[in-house]
Amino acid sequence: MLILTIFSLINLLISNIFIMLSFMISKKSTMDREKCSPFECGFDPKTLSRIPFSLHFFLITVIFLIFDIEIALILPMIISFKSVNFIIWWKISSFFMIMLLIGLYHEWNQNMLNWTM
């Protein structure tokens, strides 16, 4: 029992030494408060919350979500390639890809993909 207590105290001492060393060696200072402040959608949290939101960021978010869902729908189509009739699979996947290309063309035509502000 005495040996267990001695080892516990030694472990506690060593861990405290390492913690103190890390605090002394670390480069983090109180001057970096801005890095710790919350950043959400480019708004300063200390200003008025009724600032108009940029529509461009909203459209980019919607485009990202659409393409994210597209990937989730394309992956099962690729996996089911061997288990389904080829002609039916080809018709469904071609229709899906044509719809995606039409949506991409519409976004490009409306200048939603242009990053100039």
Image (cartoon, rainbow, N blue to C red):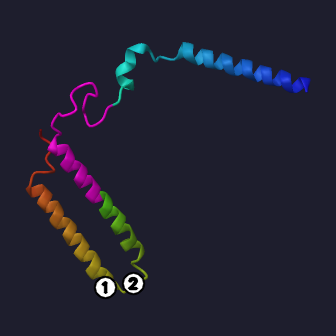
Q: Quadrant of the N terminus?
A: top right
The CA span between labels 1 and 2 is: 7 Å
x and y, in percent, of residue 78 in the image: 38, 72
Element carrying mark 2: loop
Q: As drawn, is 51 to the left or to the right of 39?
A: left
Task: Assess disc 1: are there few (<14), some (14-19) or many (≥20) residues with their C-alpha within 10 Å of its C-alpha.
Answer: few
Which residues are drawn in magenta? 39-67
- Tell me which residue sits at (16%, 40%) in the image: 54
Asked if residue 77 is positioned above or below residue 4 in the image, the reply reads below
The verdict on residue 66 being magenta is yes
**Residue nearer the viewer, 1 or 46:** 46
x and y, in percent, of residue 65 in the image: 28, 55
Kindly identify which numbered label has been placed on residue 113.
Answer: none
Residue type indicated by callout 2: Val
x and y, in percent, of residue 101 in the image: 18, 66
**Residue nearer the viewer, 47 or 85:** 47
Task: Assess disc 2: are there few (<14), some (14-19) or many (≥20) residues with their C-alpha within 10 Å of its C-alpha.
Answer: few
- Tell me which residue sits at (78%, 20%) in the image: 10
Kindly identify which numbered label has been placed on residue 88.
Answer: 1
Q: Do the residues under discs 1 and 2 have CB atoms within 8 angstroms?
A: yes
Asked if residue 83 is positioned above or below residue 115 in the image, the reply reads below
Q: As drawn, is 52 to the left or to the right of 34?
A: left
In the rendered image, which quarter is residue 15 located in? top right
Kindly identify which numbered label has been placed on residue 84.
Answer: 2
Q: As drawn, is 51 to the left or to the right of 92?
A: left
Residue type indicated by callout 1: Ile
Element carrying mark 1: helix
- Tell me which residue sits at (19%, 50%) in the image: 59
Asked if residue 27 is positioned above or below residue 71 in the image, the reply reads above
The verdict on residue 25 being magenta is no
